[in-house]
Image (spheres, rainbow, N blue to C red):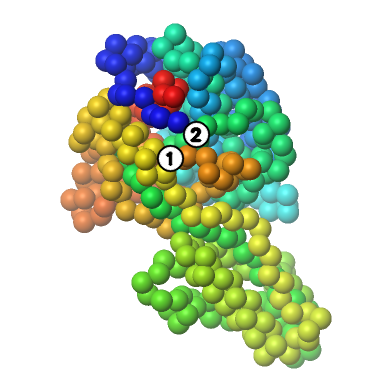
Amino acid sequence: MTFAAPLPQELISRVNEVVDTDTDRLVEIFKDIHRNPELAFGEVHTSRLIEKALQKLGFDVTKGIGRTGIAATLRNGDGPVVMYRADMDANAIEEQTGLDYASNVQVTREDGSVVPAAHMCGHDAHVTWLIGMANALVAVRDSWSGTAVLIGQPAEEPITGAKAMVDDGLYNFIPKPDVLIGMHTMPAPVGIVSSSPGPRLAGTDQVDIVFHGVGGHGSMPERTKDPLQMAARAVVAFSSVVAEQIDPSQTAILTVGAIAAGADNNVIPSRAVIRTNIRWYDPQVRETLLDAIESVSQQIARDAGVGDDLLPEIILKGGSLPLVNDPELAAAMSTSLAATIGDDRVLTDLPAATASEDVQILKGPYPDMPFNYLMVGIADSALVAAARAHGDDVPFSPHTPNYIVDLAAVPYGTKVAAYAMLGLLRGE
């Protein structure tokens, strides 16, 4: 398909007026989602907000895809089919922003553990942008022809939600898209947007290592084979894997995010779990990292006297390939956005990052579907300036407890989403 010429000024003005009029409602929706965060596959309240808002606008809505995912379709005559995704899940982080609508939520996970929950990656903004953009599309539907498919995706954080939706029959409920786009917050000033071509985000795998041993009384460690000790040695050993086994010119990260074992002071457990995460661009780097995790873990277990029947389990829980923007689509969208919001506000050369995504997995059976991923600044410009004055690039980073989406980003991101969708829906 082809991207439409830059939007006419009359249409831009109409979109701006619709969004500006809707801003108070959108800010309240954003605050609601922010103070009521839901972790992966628990996005019941959030998906219901999308469902109700889009049904009211006349979208054909299907809920419960991939547990809590939602797909909404608006047909408006002949033309391109454009799919847009917003992820819905929050993070297991205790918020420290001090906002009057900050989260104080605690969530009980399926394993019984209780963790804090907060939107520290901007998914609350993503959902709000989707709802506001849908309202704008309906308000100016006389200016475009085609089909808009809007996706509320669960479980982006563990990199499992997109696959869950595809595996649960997403394409039984929506028409085949001609193009897929997504948007994500970034800690740049409000008003800045990136539409950069080529590789954007790294591939990733979530890898659990389960060490098995022989538990016992804390007073008699000599009668045990302590899996906690094995796990501790593995954590130290993993820290040198990248330096020792990966070419320094390659992107490679191996992170330990959690260790779980035992329950009492005086009981040596029989099982310990390390939760790790790897990041990569080259598939061979991925294989090297996975092989190293397995070989290091097995050697540590054997050194501890564990037999073949108790060697560590390596469990791949979820993952995604590197995210790559279609060069032609990224260039067309950047040109259109530059004509709409200004050349100085559109970045086309943002460096690739080591964060990861699973939005591209929504392509499902259509891997050649053109795709573009926009990054949208959400930080107060004064905070950015203060950070740079102190030698920092950004005032905060995703997945930190003080990630603040400035409220001015709510209408701005909504407008960007609407501009992007209209540029595609007015194409051929």
The CA span between labels 1 and 2 is 8 Å
Q: Specify whether residue 36 is in view.
A: no
Residue at 69% x, 39% y: name it. Answer: 66
The residue at which mark 2 appears reads as 179
Residue at 43% x, 41% y: name it. Answer: 373
Location of residue 330 (image quadrant) = top left
The mark that comes first in sequence, 1 or 2, is: 2
Q: Which amino acid is tagged 1? A: Asn
Q: Position of residue 281 (x, y in %)?
A: 46, 61
Q: Position of residue 150 (x, y in %)?
A: 55, 27
Residues 75 and 122: in front is 75
Q: Is 157 displayed left or right of 125 in the figure?
A: right
The residue at which mark 1 appears reads as 372
Residue at 73% x, 54% y: name it. Answer: 111
Would you say the residues marked 1 and 2 are in contact, meaning their CB atoms lie under 8 Å apart? yes
Q: Position of residue 252 (x, y in %)?
A: 45, 68
